[in-house]
Image (cartoon, helix red, strand yellow):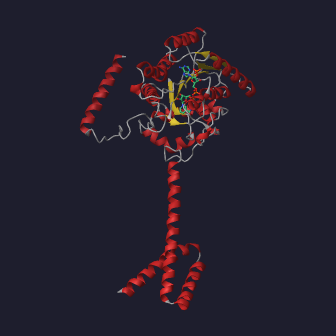
Amino acid sequence: MRNRQLWMTGACDWLIIKAPAFQYSADLVADLERRMEMMEKEKGANAARGYKRRMADQTMVLLLLHITIILIIINTIHQSPMSLPSLKEYRRNPYEATSPSRPELSQAGRTVVVTGGNSGIGYAIARNFVKASAKRVIILGRRPDVVKSAADRLVQEGKEDGSPSLVEGRVCDVGSLEATEALWSGLEKEGIFVDVLVLSAASHGKVSPILKSDLGSVWGDFEANVRSLLDFTQRFYNQKGKGATERKFLVNISTIAAYMWGSMAPERPTYGLTKNAGTTLIQQIAKDTDVNDMQIVSFHPGGVLTDMARAAGASEEMGIPFDDENLPGQMAVWAASREAEYLHGRFVWANWDVDEVKKVLGKQIAEEPNFLKVGMEGLSESMPNPMIPPEMLEKIMKFQQDLQAKLEAQK
Ligand SMILES: NC(=O)c1ccc[n+]([C@@H]2O[C@H](COP(=O)([O-])OP(=O)(O)OC[C@H]3O[C@@H](n4cnc5c(N)ncnc54)[C@H](OP(=O)(O)O)[C@@H]3O)[C@@H](O)[C@H]2O)c1
């Protein structure tokens, strides 16, 4: 019995030693066998068995090391900054498909307004509309000196690029209803029709739990990040007159913090809250808006080391790769083109390659009305719905259809 056990242990040891060695070469296996025979002849069977045991242990350790390395690699791939595992490409720099010099993305003849266009991502967006030959680019901000110097810089950049764009900076606090009324009525009086609206200005919120902040401060973030979106979108949509094209284009600069609550600016709870609410607002507007009247796309601009990011404590010392500001800059131009039509009402990332998104996710986007939209984590409206029995759902759907028909008849 003991002999059998010893034989089995020895055979197992052999397997452990020889199996990996086989992967490398038959010579290595032959060499191992020769060494065993010599050991057995010179030092006896027990010594040879002990040697074999030690070699098996060493091989096992090496094997475990290999497996650990493979697991680390797999884990790293999974933790790469990719929120949709089906997408392989992760863009950090501007790329050809969203280049403003592509004729398909030309903004010629259009007037573009960029809120918060006086710095950071908004400025990069304005720059790319200038590169895309927009007729007029108007940037908005609150600080007159920053608005002026940004507009001057844009004019200079436009000249160097040979762009025909007229660039203007206007001072406007998007959170103030008086200021926005003055802006939009002024545009109307001047006969300026806005074709593309980019909503980039935002309040970053206070570092404070909501209940430790005063009402005015929390509500102020709603005014800047939600009400201003509604105010601008309504005024933009309801403009009198005719634009360069039948279709208007609305681009909303959202954020990853609108759904990553615990890791992205959790110390500023009103930021994620109001950016989420703003993105949902834009999504709900898109639901009831024909894309041919107004095309609407929201996107996360990536991680750009802007003034806002620095004010929140981000810096080069963090050791993370920040994205080029022209990545979202170009993405906004692409989002204001017909190529982005199929994303009407959805949320994407500037880091996702637009061609790959279309190729890999196009079918899912066409088939799932709530895919890439704000919802409740873990719950979905997918049909059949596990929570609502089909016969009940059928009745609810019938009720909705009848209601819709009544509303249509009343129009
Ligand atoms: N940076 C990132 O990595 C990142 C990541 C995710 C999302 N985002 C989003 O990207 C957008 C731009 O952010 P950013 O990082 O470029 O910030 P930024 O450098 O601070 O630029 C924000 C701009 O908005 C203007 N602004 C702020 N409040 C305004 C108001 N009430 N009325 C008019 N203008 C106002 C500011 O100018 P004034 O102070 O002169 O008004 C400033 O020019 C924001 O919507 C933000 O949520 C940024």
Give the quarter of the figure containing the N terminus: bottom left
Which residue: 34% across, 16% down? 410
Image-quarter location of ligand 1: top right
Q: Position of residue 249 (x, y in %)?
A: 54, 25
Say if residue 378 shows up in the picture.
yes
Which residue: 51% across, 85% down? 48
Instruction: Determine the residue located farthest toward the bottom in the rendered image.
Output: 41
Q: Position of residue 272 (x, y in %)?
A: 46, 31
Quarter of the image where one finds residue 33 = bottom right
Instruction: Determine the residue located farthest toward the top in the rendered image.
Output: 189
Q: Locate residue 207 relative to residue 192 in the image: left or right.
A: left
Say if residue 240 shows up in the picture.
no
- Is 200 above or below relative to 77? above
Q: Position of residue 254 (x, y in %)?
A: 50, 30
Q: Position of residue 325 (x, y in %)?
A: 62, 33
**In front: 144, or 48?**
48
Q: Locate residue 263 relative to residue 151 in the image: left or right.
A: left
Q: Locate residue 386 relative to residue 333 in the image: left or right.
A: left
Give the quarter of the figure containing the C terminus: top left
- Is 49 above or below relative to 117? below
